[in-house]
Amino acid sequence: MCLSSAEICPCQAPDAGASVFISQSLGVDTTAGRFGDVSLLTCKTCGRLWLHYYVVYEGIPRSGRWFRGLITPVLAEDLDPLAATQVLEQLPGYFYGGSYFDSSGQWGQGPVQVDG
Ligand SMILES: [Zn+2]
């Protein structure tokens, strides 16, 4: 792990692909009848931890959306999938995108639009 503030790591790109990370499933967020896939992503380059949330509503075109927020190791240690959206909303910001937003990745903050 070698961090330099001058260096931009691939994980900090809004549209960073799956190959940038090691992904570990944390479970499913079943709040309000949705099935949000919650994963912990570890950047292969810098080791940063990201909380990843993905939800899509079957049968609803362009409903897929994901959120990815940088979290601390302490937060990652005991992360309840049911609390994942709250964790994202409490961060200073997060990346989000998907067909629902017609975006491959952009920066946002505050409430996450996860409900169908
Ligand atoms: Zn990184």
Image (cartoon, rainbow, N blue to C red):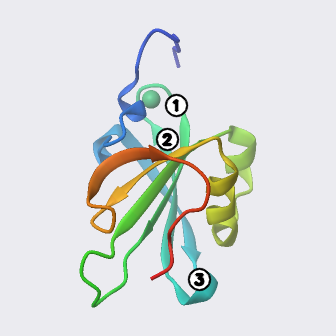
Q: Are marks 1 and 2 in contact (CB under 8 Å)?
A: yes
Q: Is residue 58 left or right of residue 48?
A: left
In which quadrant will I find the C terminus?
Answer: bottom left
- Residue 34 on image: x %, y %: 51, 84
- Mark 3: few, some, or many residues within 10 Å (few <14, many ≥20)? few
Asked if ligand 1 lies within 8 A of label 1, the reply is yes
What residue is pinned by disc 3? 30
x and y percentages locating residue 20 in the rendered image? 34, 38
- In the picture, measured across the screen, residue 103 lies left or right of residue 24, that is left
Report the front residue among 110 and 39: 110
Q: Amino acid at mark 1?
A: Gly
Image x and y of residue 82, in percent: 67, 72
In primary-sequence order, the first of circles 1 and 2 is 2
Please report the residue visible at 50 percent of the width from the left and 72 percent of the height from the top. 114
Mark carried by residue 2: none
- Quick one: 57 or 80, which is closer to the camera? 57
Residue at the spot of label 2 = 42
Of discs 2 and 3, which sits in the foreground? 3
Of the four image quadrants, the one with ligand 1 is top left
**Res 43 quadrant in image:** top left
Asked whether the beta carbons under mark 1 and mark 3 sit within 8 Å of each other, the answer is no
Q: Nearer the viewer, mark 1 or mark 3?
A: 3
Secondary structure under the numbered disc 3 in the rendered image: loop
Residue depicted at 59% across the width and 83% down the height: 30
Label 2, label 3: how many angstroms apart (C-alpha)? 24 Å
Which element is circle 1 on? Answer: loop
Which amino acid lies under the numbered mark 2 shown in the image of this protein? Thr
Q: Which residue position holds label 1? A: 47
**Is 19 rendered above or below residue 103?**
above
Q: Residue at x 51, y 10 (%)?
A: 4
